[in-house]
Image: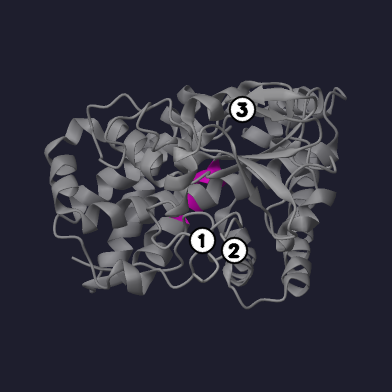
Amino acid sequence: MSPPAPAVDDSFPRLRKCPYLPPEEYGALREADGPAVRRLYHGGPIWVISDYAQARAVLHDTRFSSDITHPGYPIYAEVLESFRAFPLLNTLDPPLHTAQRRAVVSEFTLRKAEELRPAMRKKAEELLDAMTDGADTADLVAAFAEPFAGTITCWALGMDYADLQSWLVASREVREKASGSATDAGDVGQEIAHQIIALQQYFQKFVDEKIEHPGDDPVSRVVEKYVRGGDLSKEELVKLCFVIFVAGQSPVKAMITIGLLRLLERPDELAAVRERSDALPAVVDELTRLVSPLDLMPRVAKEDVEIGGRLIRAGEGVVVAGAAANRDAAEYPDPDRLDLDRESRGNLAFGSGLHHCLGANLTRVGLQVAYGTLLTRLPALRLAESSAEIYEHPSWHPEISRMPVAW
């Protein structure tokens, strides 16, 4: 008698074993004929979309909701359940989503991002001057990526980055706990809730100041145009500031470090990038496709919908696995290769449809500046430790807390 077959681990999501590679299980998901069923932390089923065309269809289909307060909306980790009580722009449906996005979208155009490019270059140079002054090694996260990402995100709001240092330190510690395997979900969930409240309180004071003393900055302009006229409440603007800062700062920091980590561990790709100084937009598009900083995009079906031959019933949760879709060979031939001649701007690294990332233009320009400055100023830039040593806290999303480099 043969031994019983081992139980199949169908848990979702899975941790990344490498920061710039999606979980190995994504390969099996892409081979499935249509959406696949997996299990969340509480054992409940979830539909996972890994095919690029199907993923894009779901993200553009208004029959799928982003409303986090819907009981079927899939929260993929117990420590994140506190977010149900704090709906933000990315977890709202129209008409609330439409009204809030309309109030700020004009501050995140490509023209606005390009206007910040000279200041971004200056900031990048200043950070590298400080990092390399009398030193030949540094932690790229602390010395460059985090302050650069935080600064340009604060510029987009008219804030002072220095005011948020203590919150960023505490938030980083909580994120590391949330990614750990031996954590008390209840305790970490409470810490996340406290961090949300603390940052919300900061932005309440920030918005109050802009209402009383408006200036020539993005939030003041939103106050004058929308808050004073009653089209947007002060509380809604506070939440918009919150989500813009949190959703803007972390992906830029992650892409600076993890994008470079991939290049530094793949000399052929690094050489190709160095040879094409005019290809920074393509570099950013391909690296964001390969790293996919916005990987897991939850939705819930509002009515019965057929996707890829599967019937998803009303009330069932769906997660679009962006990192899997971005490596779909049907859309991107030889998908694991960085190809600077590939047309990859339509990848799902910034989402798609109604909830396409508000700060995508700012992020793209910022990454072009960051990569260009680092690779020009530090032609001998190299890792001081292997990626295995650096990636101490595997996570669902691509993120590293430190990156020792030398030059």
Q: Which residues are magenta?
A: 147-155
Which residue matches tag 1? Answer: 15
Label 1 neighbour load within 10 Å: few <14, some 14-19, many 20+: some
Label 2 neighbour load within 10 Å: few <14, some 14-19, many 20+: some
Label 3, secondary structure: give it: helix
Image point (85%, 43%), residue name: 71
Q: Earlier in the sequence, mark 1 or mark 3?
A: 1
Closest to the observer, 145 or 357:
357
Q: Position of residue 92 (x, y in %)?
A: 76, 34
- Give the CA separation, mark 3 to mark 2: 31 Å
Q: Earlier in the sequence, mark 1 or mark 2?
A: 1
- Give the CA separation, mark 1 to mark 3: 23 Å
Assess whether mark 2 and mark 3 are in contact (beta carbons under 8 angstroms): no
Which residue matches tag 3? Answer: 59
Image point (68%, 55%), residue name: 40
Image point (52%, 54%), residue name: 397
Q: Would residue 183 be visible to someone looking at this image?
A: yes
The kind of residue on which mark 2 rests is Leu
- In the image, taking residue 185 as reference, residue 344 lies left or right, namely left
Label 1, secondary structure: give it: loop
Closest to the observer, 214 or 370:
370
Q: Position of residue 216 (x, y in %)?
A: 62, 32
Label 2, secondary structure: give it: helix
Which residue matches tag 2? Answer: 168
